[in-house]
Amino acid sequence: MFKVMESVKATFSPDDIKSLLLKFWPFYSDGQECDVAELLEFLVAILHEELQTRKTGESFISGCFFGKFLRVDICKLCHKTRSETEDFSILHVPVVENATLLTCIEKYRMDEIIKDSTCVFCKRKVDLLRKTIITKLPPVLIVHLLRYAKVSN
């Protein structure tokens, strides 16, 4: 995307940038709104893709903005665990009323129950206990404070 921008001209209006983004991110071409955090996450990913080296797959962007999660799912029936490592560039944390940023991040890290999930081991519909562990913080941590909470009926 940025190579296209370099080859066209030196300055861009917001409309030019929007048109160019829609070429690379057509999901929003039908007039849907875009969350600023989604746009930032997209731009960080595009920059990483364009700047990464073929040999290592790393870039200046991944070195600055990418951290790692460890997600551990525990079946409440067979008690077997499945672990998965995942990169992140933005930490999406819920806002806790009258709390510090650290308290909000701790709430994000709290164990959660994933209801009616299929266990990969026992193949039954069960509730899974999910633990999220931040194993590597990036040097530049982008925190997106979620203003709205999911409400269960």
Image (cartoon, rainbow, N blue to C red):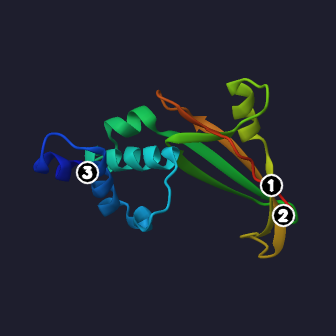
Q: Is residue 152 above or below residue 67?
A: below
Q: Earlier in the sequence, mark 3 or mark 2?
A: 3
Along the viewing direction, whichever of 116 and 76 lies nearer the viewer? 116
Hey, what amino acid is under mark 1? Val
In contact (CB < 8 Å): disc 3 and disc 2? no
Q: Which mark is residue 127?
A: 2
Q: Residue 130, percent across and down? A: 75, 52
Mark 2 is surrounded, within 10 Å at the Cα level, by few (under 14), some (14 to 19) or many (20 or more) other residues, namely some
- Total marks drawn? 3
Element type at mark 1: loop
Along the viewing direction, whichever of 32 and 124 lies nearer the viewer? 32
Residue at which label 1 appears: 151
Residue at which label 3 appears: 16
Q: Residue 55, percent across and down? A: 27, 48
Relative to residue 18, is residue 106 drawn left or right?
Answer: right
Element type at mark 2: strand
Q: Which mark is residue 97?
A: none
Q: Residue 67, percent across and down? A: 51, 38
Hey, what amino acid is under mark 3? Asp
